[in-house]
Image (spheres, rainbow, N blue to C red):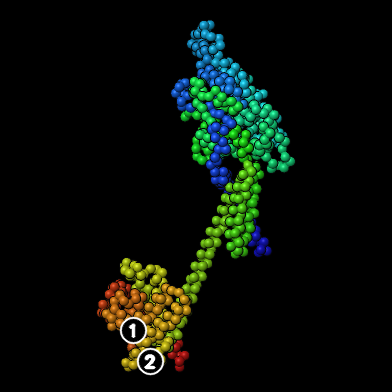
Amino acid sequence: MRILARYGLILTLVIVLHGLCRISGALPFFDFRCYDLLAGRPEAPFTPDSAITLVVEIDEESLQRLGQWPWPRLLLAKTVELLLQQRPAAVGLDIFFPEADRTSPVQIARFYRQLLDLQVPLESFPPALIDHDRIFAAALARGPTVLPLFLQHQPTAEARPLPDSARFGPLPPDSKVPQAGALLINTPMLQQAATGSGYINAALDRDGVFRRQPLVIGYDGQLVPGLALALLRQIDPAARLLPSAPESWAPLCFDVLGRTVHTNQRGETLTRLYPATAFRRVSLARLLSGEVPADLASGKIVLIGATAAGLFDQYITPAGEVLPGVFVHAALLENLLRGVSLYQPDSAPQLAFGLSLVLSLVLVWLVLQHRYLLSWITYLGGVCGTVLFACLLLRQGVYVALGYFLLPFSFLFFLVSLFFAVLHYVERKRFLEDLGAAHSATIDSMTMVAESRDIETGCHIQRTKEYVRLLANQLLCQGLFSRQLSTHVIDLLFRAAPLHDIGKVGIPDEILRKPARLTDAETAIMRSHVTIGYRVIQNAINSYNKTNEFLSIAANIAYSHHEKWDGSGYPQGLRGEQIPLEARLMALADVYDALTSRRCYKDIFPFEEAEELILAERDRHFDPRIVDAFALLRPAFREVACRYRASEQEQRLAARAQLA
């Protein structure tokens, strides 16, 4: 039952975390970035000389030479005529004409008649120039020309019929192609004159970047081609939508110029965009003035569009560049004709998300089994494998929604790793604390082996390590010995202090417990405890086979805690700063405890007298800075001494009873 509950918890955790990723809305944005990273900044598979398309720009130069927009449509009519004379494959306009040309003489006359009730005589005006729209329509009718449409998703009160030139075929049943609710067309005269029509709607992603473009949109039960596909139909009238494959995940397929173009079920293709400099371009003003070669448009698909600032639709590319809409259509044409189009299957996000869910379950299970290395291998293998797989498919023209896998999988791995890192830290901290406590207890026990032979010194090791810690903390607060003291070092001092008299284990009982004054020979033997203790600890260091900070501090304390500031101490007669700081601290703590504690050879000194003796030894026995710190700590030292006296009394009575 516990196992089922455990696995149920794993499943719930993984599902909840994936659900958070899903509802946060971050998955599509992360997937966009993954696609941008994998696709990179593609280089154009063509040069301006080899480009199949020709872009005729209404640029800044054209506005300067021909006047501000909008122009009389005579200029556009003349442009189309000049281009058609060069026998292009097709001419498309990325310019919408929903109203009549107000610069036409007939429109000007109508304006004055309706507004001011004035009759403007047009009899002397050349009949051929009275209506600019008629002139423009006549130019469009002379060759393969395509005008734009605009489809709106929200329906309007008046439903316009779809022009015959914009019918690509019936809308397939159960189609997922987006449906338009309203249609905006050019003026009827122009619309009927053009041989083709295609919409110019753009499908921007949620982050406002242009990546995908639908080849068709549904309207009134019919498929309406985009401007690029409508231009290709001028070359290949048999272009069509192929029957769908039986699999529900299969993309739509279009047969264009004998090439199969794949899209998702919504009819969208991922468009590789290129800088404007990659295309063959010409200013419309230069074309009209005859400053271009006479065969410039021969065999090309020509697109006429605005590139002057403020006149064009701005499209943000994945590289962060702003591209006029005419180059977006030109890029799609080049990609379709060269077979470099991409698409993302509709089922790809769901499959990627599902794979993340499965691998996340495996990952969490491995972590709970404490197979941390295998969990890392699973994560890295899953990430690297899917990235490699996505790169390979991208070369085949398919993008598999890598972000829908990477984000939830990596998010869960991060949270699980963070959780177990914190858990490991807590467990390790607890282990180290237990180990430190056991270590200190072991050291205290080792020291008690020596100290227990003297029934009068039961709590000596407890008091002295408290004194050492008080002194070290005070010096650190005063900013003294900042290079030598830290909280870590003070902790080591506290734990190493009990080893200062470990060498007494080698001193005979008759000397250690002698109640009278020692002879010179006995004093020499007693003083040898520092050398014995040093050797014991040094042997431990040698066995450890590398430098150990704790043992080094303990060795210095054991060997030098009887050295004096003026050089009169033993065993080496060190003076001043030659004495290790830890030994200087221990020296004061040891003497203070000896004065305020009962010994077999002396009684307890009153606190005031003991303190005066310590202060009197400033610059002689003790480091003056340590004595100054002690002077500030006298109440704290008294508190420690009093706290352990009751415990020591109990230990003394128990020891005497055991000896009796």
Q: In this view, does 520 lie above or below 120?
A: below
Of helix, strand and loop, which one carries label 2?
helix
Residue 165 horizontal/vertical position (percent): 65, 24
Q: Is residue 440 above or below residue 379?
A: below
Neighbor class of circle 2 (other Cα within 10 Å; few <14, some 14-19, many 20+) is some
Residue 100 horizontal/vertical position (percent): 55, 18
Question: Which residue has dot 1 on it?
Answer: 571
- The residue drawn where x is 27% and y is 80% is 566
Left or right of 338: which side holds 551?
left
Residue 585 horizontal/vertical position (percent): 34, 76
- The residue drawn where x is 48% and y is 71% is 433
Quadrant location of the N terminus in the rendered image: bottom right
Of helix, strand and loop, which one carries label 1?
loop
Q: Distance between the residues labelled 1 and 2?
A: 19 Å
- Is residue 461 visible in this depiction of the protein? no
Q: Do the residues labelled 1 and 2 touch (CB within 8 Å)?
A: no
Quadrant assignment, res 334:
top right
* Disc number lying in front (1 or 2): 1
Q: Which amino acid does label 1 sit on?
A: Pro
Quadrant assignment, res 599:
bottom left
- The residue drawn where x is 54% and y is 23% is 294
Viewer-nearest residue: 52 or 65: 52
Question: Which residue has dot 2 on it?
Answer: 511
- The residue drawn where x is 41% and y is 76% is 552
Q: Earlier in the sequence, mark 1 or mark 2?
A: 2
Viewer-nearest residue: 312 or 622: 312
- Is residue 432 visible in this depiction of the protein? yes
Residue 553 horizontal/vertical position (percent): 39, 76
